[in-house]
Image (cartoon, rainbow, N blue to C red):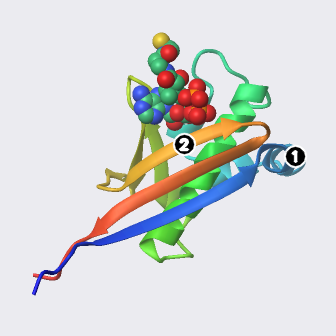
Amino acid sequence: MIVAPRVRTGCDVVDVARLAAAIARRPGLLQRLFTDHEIAECCRGEVAVDSEVGRARFAARFAAKEAARKALGDLRLPFHAVEVRSRPDGAPELWLHGEPSELSCSLSHDAGIAMALVVGVELAPT
Ligand SMILES: CC(C)(COP(=O)(O)OP(=O)(O)OC[C@H]1O[C@@H](n2cnc3c(N)ncnc32)[C@H](O)[C@@H]1OP(=O)(O)O)[C@@H](O)C(=O)NCCC(=O)NCCS
């Protein structure tokens, strides 16, 4: 019998303006949702948190956290447990609980929407 590896996926879309409004309304929400590393990376290139680019980057990272929850089947995974880190070429990587993970992640943002797709392969029990 051939046993195919089980692929786990999660996706999420975020309304960029809606998340930006929530962050503007609630002091501390930015830090509650995102790690210091993510905040620094979203502001890379002297981008302001509340600029068009900044808002889209935060929304995409929020989508990645929700997508990771779906892919892992853990809908209560804390926001800081999932972290998006950008490689030097700009490609996103997913860190889990402060460690690099085997999950693959892709982000996109356009026309007021940000989205993320997270894919992983479930390891067979040994
Ligand atoms: C990288 C690229 C595919 C992004 O596509 P886009 O339509 O411009 O933008 P999207 O909204 O779909 O995607 C943006 C996300 O792509 C991701 N991304 C950036 N570089 C990437 C890469 N090399 N591989 C995979 N994903 C990448 C990032 O997560 C980015 O989001 P972020 O800025 O919030 O971190 C596109 O810019 C491209 O083809 N670039 C070619 C190289 C280039 O022109 N570089 C310019 C800088 S030198």
One can see residue 79 in this view: no
Q: Would you say 13 lies left or right of 2 here?
A: right
What is the tally of numbered marks visible in this picture? 2
Residue 111 appears at what percent x and percent y? 78, 36
Residue at horizontal 59%, vertical 62%?
A: 66
Mark 2 vs ligand 1: CB under 8 Å? yes
Could you tell me which residue is drawn at 73 percent across and 24 percent down? 48
Q: Secondary structure at mark 1?
A: helix
- Which residue is disc 1 drawn over? 21
Work out whether residue 112 can be spotted. Answer: yes
Q: Nearer the viewer, residue 90 or 20?
A: 90
Give the label on residue 107, or none: 2
Ligand 1 closer than 8 Å to the CB at disc 1?
Answer: no
User: Could you say where residue 74 lies in the image, as x and y percent from the top left?
Assistant: 49, 76
Classify 10 Å Cα crowding around label 1: few (below 14), some (14-19), many (20 and above).
few
Determine the CA span between mark 1 and mark 2.
21 Å
* Residue at x 55%, y 66% (from the top left corner): 78
Q: Nearer the viewer, residue 105 or 98?
A: 105
> Which quadrant is the N terminus positioned in?
bottom left
Q: Amino acid at mark 1?
A: Ala
Amino acid type, mark 2 = Leu
Classify 7 as above or below 114: below
> The C terminus appears in which quarter of the rendering?
bottom left
Image quadrant where residue 16 sits: top right
Spot the residue most to the front.
Answer: 1
Q: Using residue 107 as the reference point, say whether residue 114 is left or right of it.
A: right
Residue 42, which numbered label? none
Report the front residue among 29 and 12.
12
